[in-house]
Image: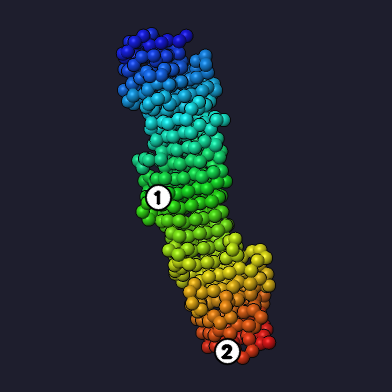
Amino acid sequence: MAVTSSGDGNFSSVIAGGLSVNDDVIINHDVTMDGHAPNVNSLVINSGKTLTGGGYKITIDSENSSGFAVDNDGIISGNLDLEINTPATTQIDLNGSSGNFRDVKLNDASVDARLAENTTIGRNLTIAAGELNTSGSNYSLTVTEKTSISSGTLTLNNSVVLLGTTSTSDYGLTMSGGACNMGGSDCKTGAVNISGGALTPSSATWEVMSAYSSNAWISVPSSFTNQGTLKFTSPLGGNIRTPQGMNDVIFDASSGTPTWTIITQGFQCVNLTITDGTLDTGSDYGLVVTGDVDITGTLTGNASAISMGSLSVASGGTYNATSGTTTITSENGSNQAFWNEGTFTHNNGKVVIDTEGNNHTTVKGTTFYDLEVNMTNNTREAKFRPKTGTHSEILNNFTLTQGIYEMHADGDTLDIHGLTTIEANGQFLKDAEHTGLVTHHGLVTNRGNYMLKDGVTVKMNGGFRQLGTFTTP
């Protein structure tokens, strides 16, 4: 049965059955809530008519003959909350011509609420049970402050989604259970806190725009497989606790120069881009990037174990290297394994060039502390060039485990201040064509092949232990 408002006035006066009405309610006048309405069958607000909330809540427990639990074509004034407990698949049209429901809650395991229009929720969305679905039409969903999922499901399909984009007073998305299926949606959120539940991230871009209580992203589940791009733009930076398995990750501050700090579990992704701001490994948590790392902001490595597919530091960018080991495992599309156009601070750490594949690779950097070259096979070259000028130096030890160490230009010069070790599958210089001065200040142990152009001088101030081949064609 449908009950239509009888005139302007308070809900309890103009709706037959009053606040405890258990019928389909049609608002066809300007009506003001004067208490909670706990068991409305369905709600329709007609065009041009205003329902004023007063801070009260309407609870929906069914749907009308058109299949709508809520069908709003009118105006919502003030603070009006909504709870949907329809035990079936139902349509909801929450956006009228003006105003929004403040807090919206789903709280029945059988409810399957499908958006019928682009939707904005004025404050919080809570899914305690049931499902909210943006539907096959991929209607957009905007939640101004906080989205909480404790049980039930949020299904976003390929919609444009904004969850808590402006608030820094709480997490934009909190999951303690249930599921969030992001599909191919472009999603923007405030800070994220996932302590339980099943999260299937977007294959598009998920942007984290704010931080709360020093945290930007807190994720406890042991697995996280993101097929798209996870982008951090918060001007506040924030702590990041994350499981493994992210795809492309971008740090690009919307303003300022914030710091994002890894606080536990390490950090693993496919590709990493630091456009602006700083990513800090915190208390020496590991960083593993299987693809490319591109830096125009700052990466601070502390004493962490760091592995990258390739590393490119652009002009203005900084890599404050780990005092442990930075391992380079591949190269970018230009066959560059380590390419520094900005600032590389070695912090007495070690860089290992351990690239896979069949391509020769290039390394650009003037000064290293400890350096090791370990190519896939003994015929692959690592060609080194200084950032500027013609001189490079290794301040401590150099180890050539496998492959060929070559300099960019035959006339480039090199100083190695510590030990030089050339293993059996290593070749120092190529084709004996190098003419620039090489100075070894420490002991050289050669188990591989040291190639020297006839008539060219090399200085071995710390001695030479010859156990391999010394070629001077």
Q: Quadrant of residue 327?
A: bottom right
Q: Quadrant of residue 5?
A: top left
Residue 439 shows up from this direction: yes
Amino acid type, residue under disc 2 in the picture: Thr
> Mark 1 packing: few (<14 Cα in 10 Å), some, or many (20+)?
some
Task: Please state, as top left, top right, bottom left or bottom right, where the C terminus lies in the image.
Answer: bottom right
SS assignment at label 1 = loop
| In the depicted structure, whether residue 472 falls above or below residue 149 | below
- Report if the CB atoms under discs 1 and 2 are less than 8 Å apart: no
Horizontal and vertical percent for residue 274? 47, 56
The mark tally for this picture is 2
Residue ranking furthest to the bottom: 455
177 or 168, which lies in front? Answer: 168
| In the depicted structure, whether residue 102 falls above or below residue 229 | above
Q: Nearer the viewer, mark 1 or mark 2?
A: 1
Q: Tell me which residue sits at (34%, 24%) in the image.
A: 77
Q: Tell me which residue sits at (53%, 88%) in the image.
A: 461
Instruction: Please name the residue that numbered disc 1 is placed on.
Output: 254
Left or right, 45 with respect to 443, comes to: left
> Mark 2 packing: few (<14 Cα in 10 Å), some, or many (20+)?
few
SS assignment at label 2 = loop
Horizontal and vertical percent for residue 255? 37, 51
Q: Tell me which residue sits at (40%, 32%) in the image.
A: 124
Left or right, 223 with respect to 195, comes to: right
Amino acid type, residue under disc 1 in the picture: Ser
Horizontal and vertical percent for residue 453? 63, 86
34 or 302, which lies in front? Answer: 34
Instruction: Please name the residue that numbered disc 2 is placed on.
Output: 457
C-alpha distance separating marks 1 and 2: 54 Å
First-in-chain label (1 vs 2): 1
